[in-house]
């Protein structure tokens, strides 16, 4: 059983799917590990680190694919990369099946069993495999640091001979994994933090981290399947916007994290809200890749409106590649322990983790929503 670790070719991607410390543990499962030379360099894991851990370093993509049964990657593969994959191999990576359905079709046409890590079910047994949660932790942390560096102000309170400086005010919209980590990081930096979420169940978590929970007068439950938020009615959404508007005008830093699986991100910050904010304020929109929570967000760009910076980062976890890769690797390692039994690949589609994650197998597209996107029965 040979596992191939690919390098990342996507612009701005510094992570690697498997780090050296995972190699010995996978070898105990009866696996051999082959790594494309330089695959971990951007994450500060060198070829010699993999070799010392027991992996084989291959000079290029073609050589690493020889006799490989399992292929590990962070970002979705390109069509050119898919052409090098051995038939019936298993690909484990992020795949964005709903935004790239044609890619899933290409994987099915190549007889690749593709497992999309973003589809790992939100169940207790799969928590240690949950790549979205681990990478959201990194994104929430980095978002606050990025926002603080863009502000022309301190976040903590200072009492000096030159006078007292009030603590900065931070508003977190969406209290999933990224939002909670953003709250914790902002509080560590000494900011005054408020947070809003349409799921009342997260109030206790928000307050336990030292933030104030912004509540709507009329209780609205936006709790969706698997603990995710769900789309609100038009009337509920309008009340949500009115509430946010009353809190955002005197906020120094806003971090938005709200997303709805399979749908565009909900708009939480209108143009009027931006115009009400003070010049020098900063918005970091973590939902930029799905349309953004802010009306004026542009993915990968910084937009300045009336002195307010609106930043739509494309890939924050990649900016902390050492620990982002470490967490990603542990998620993948745990999943592999489910799939490899005594050195043999075991694909049990009655298992809800495999069934929920698999998007293509044996020449067929298995993911229902992707089939729907492609117009297939």
Image (cartoon, rainbow, N blue to C red):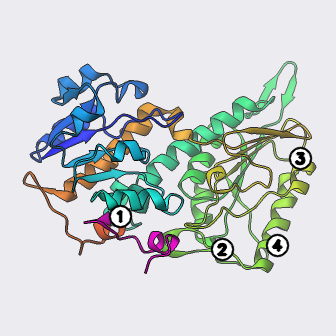
Q: Nearer the viewer, mark 1 or mark 4?
A: 1
Residue bearing the label numbered 1: 357
Earlier sequence position, callout 4 versus callout 2:
2
Circles 1 and 3: CB distance less than 8 Å? no
Residue at the spot 33% in from the left edge and 49% down from the top edge: 331
Q: Mark 4 = which residue? A: 238
Q: Which residues are magenta?
A: 360-377
Identify whether 232 is placed above or below 244: below
Q: Secondary structure at mark 1?
A: helix
Contact between marks 2 and 1 (CB within 8 A): the answer is: no
Give yes or no for residue 353 being in the magenta stretch.
Answer: no
The Cα atoms of the two marked residues, 1 and 3, are separated by 42 Å
Q: Earlier in the sequence, mark 3 or mark 2?
A: 2
Residue 9: x and y in percent read: 44, 34
Please rate how many residues cluster around mark 1, counting C-alpha atoms within 10 Å: few if below 14, some from 14 to 19, many from 20.
many
Is 211 above or below relative to 314? below
Q: Is residue 126 left or right of residue 234?
A: left
In the rendered structure, which disc, 1 or 4, sits on the residue that comes first in sequence?
4
* Rendered location of residue 166, percent (x, y): 82, 36
Where 211 sits versus 142, above or below? below
From mark 1 to mark 4, how far is it between C-alphas? 35 Å
In this rendered view, identify the residue nearer to me: 348 or 188.
348
Which of 95/61 is in front? 61
Q: Are marks 3 and 2 in contact (CB under 8 Å)?
A: no
Name which quarter of the figure residue 147 lies in: top right
Give the crowd class for mark 2: few <14, some 14-19, many >=20 residues within 10 Å.
some
Residue assigned mark 3: 277
- 313 vs 150: above or below: below
Badge 3 density bin: few <14, some 14–19, many ≥20, Cα 10 Å = many
State the residue position of label 2: 231
The CA distance from mark 3 to mark 2 is: 26 Å
């Amino acid at each position: 059983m040979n596992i191939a670790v690919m390098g990342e070719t996507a612009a701005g991607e510094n992570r690697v799917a498997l780090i050296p410390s995972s190699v010995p543990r996978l070898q105990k499962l009866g696996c051999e590990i082959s790594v494309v030379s330089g695959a971990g360099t951007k994450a500060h894991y060198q070829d010699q680190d993999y070799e010392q851990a027991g992996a084989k370093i291959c000079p290029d993509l073609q050589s690493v694919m020889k006799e490989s049964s399992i292929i590990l990657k962070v970002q979705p593969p390109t069509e050119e990369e898919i052409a090098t994959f051995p038939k019936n191999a298993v690909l484990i990576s992020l795949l964005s099946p709903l935004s790239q359905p044609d890619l899933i079709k290409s994987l099915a046409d190549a007889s690749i069993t593709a497992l999309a890590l973003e589809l790992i079910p939100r169940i207790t047994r799969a928590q240690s495999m949950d790549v979205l949660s681990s990478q959201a932790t990194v994104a929430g942390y980095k978002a606050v640091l990025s926002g603080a560096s863009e502000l022309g102000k301190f976040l903590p309170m200072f009492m000096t001979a030159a006078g007292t400086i009030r603590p900065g005010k931070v508003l977190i919209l969406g209290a999933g994994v990224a939002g909670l980590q953003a709250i914790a990081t902002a509080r560590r930096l000494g900011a005054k933090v408020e947070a809003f979420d349409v799921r009342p169940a997260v109030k206790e978590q928000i307050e336990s981290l030292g933030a104030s929970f912004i509540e709507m007068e009329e209780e609205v439950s936006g709790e969706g399947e698997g603990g995710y938020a769900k789309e609100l009615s038009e009337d509920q959404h309008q009340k949500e916007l009115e509430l946010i508007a009353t809190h955002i005008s005197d906020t120094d830093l806003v971090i938005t994290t709200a997303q709805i699986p399979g749908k565009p991100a909900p708009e939480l910050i209108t143009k009027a809200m931006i115009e009400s904010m003070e010049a020098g304020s900063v918005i970091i929109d973590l939902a930029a890749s799905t349309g953004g929570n802010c009306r004026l967000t542009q993915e990968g760009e910084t937009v300045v409106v009336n002195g307010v910076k609106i930043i739509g980062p494309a890939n924050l976890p990649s900016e902390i590649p050492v620990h982002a890769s470490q967490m990603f690797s542990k998620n993948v390692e745990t999943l592999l322990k489910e799939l490899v039994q005594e050195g043999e690949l075991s694909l049990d589609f009655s298992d809800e983790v495999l069934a929920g994650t698999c998007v293509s197998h044996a020449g067929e597209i298995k993911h229902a929503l992707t089939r729907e996107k492609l117009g297939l029965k």
